[in-house]
Image (cartoon, grey):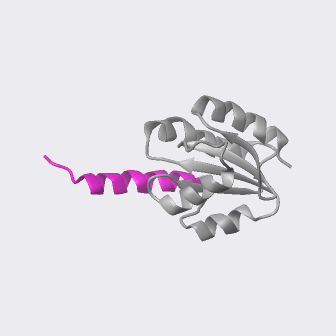
Amino acid sequence: MTMDFNFYMEDITKQARSEMEASGYEQLTTPEEVEEAFKRPGTTLVMVNSVCGCAGGIARPAAAHAVHYDKRPDHLVTVFAGQDKEATAYARMIFGEDHLPSSPSFALLKDGKIENVKLNLAEATNGLRNSMKKVN
C-alpha cells in the first residue's frame, strides 16, 4: 500500500490547524493578517505552530491549556511554520533579531510589543505559565 505524501501532510496540517482553532486561536495566514493582529491593543499570545511531534505532543496542548487561567491574553493567534511561510517570516521579523526562528514557539505581545519570547519547548512551557501570571 502506498500513500501520497502531500495528501498525508495536508491531513496532518488540517488536524494541527483544527486543534488551534478549537482552542480559540485565530489563524494568521498572510503578512497583512499578522500586521493587523499584532497592532491590537492589549495582550496577544502568539504560537508558531508546526507539524512536528513537539508541536503536537507538547506545544499545542500547552497552548490549549493556556486559555484556562484566570488571567488570559486578550487575543490568541497562531502562524504555521512551513505552511504559511510569509506570515511566519513576518511574525518572526516583528519578534526581532534576538528571536531565533524556532517552531514550535510562543511569544507574548502587549500593545504590539514583545513581552516574552521563548525559543524551546521547556522554556516555552515554563514561560507560558509565568507569562499568564503577568497578563492584564
Task: Point out residue 120 in the picture as x, y percentages from the top left corner.
Answer: 59, 34
Magenta residue check for 49: no
- Residue at the image point whose x is 57% and y is 49% from the top: 48
Q: Residue furthest left?
A: 1
Task: Point out residue 54 in the picture as x, y percentages from the top left corner.
Answer: 49, 36
**Location of residue 77 (image quadrant):** bottom right
Q: Is residue 12 left or right of residue 33?
A: left
- Residue at the image point whose x is 77% and y is 58% from the top: 112
Task: Write down the region rendered in magenta.
Answer: 1-22
**Location of residue 68 (image quadrant):** top right
**Location of residue 119 (image quadrant):** top right
Can you see residue 71? yes
Q: Is residue 20 left or right of residue 1?
A: right
Q: Is residue 53 left or right of residue 9?
A: right
Q: Nearer the viewer, residue 136 or 68?
A: 136
Q: Residue furthest front?
A: 97
Counting every numbered tag in the picture gives 0
Residue 86, placed above or below residue 53? below
Magenta residue check for 7: yes
Q: Nearer the viewer, residue 96 or 61?
A: 96
- Residue at the image point whose x is 65% and y is 31% from the top: 123
Can you see residue 24? no
For the stretch drawn in magenta, the main secondary structure is: helix
Q: Nearer the viewer, residue 6 or 15?
A: 6
Task: Point out residue 96 in the picture as x, y percentages from the top left corner.
Answer: 68, 50
Q: Residue furthest right?
A: 136
Task: Point out residue 3 in the picture as x, y percentages from the top left corner.
Answer: 20, 50
Residue 131, placed above or below residue 73? above
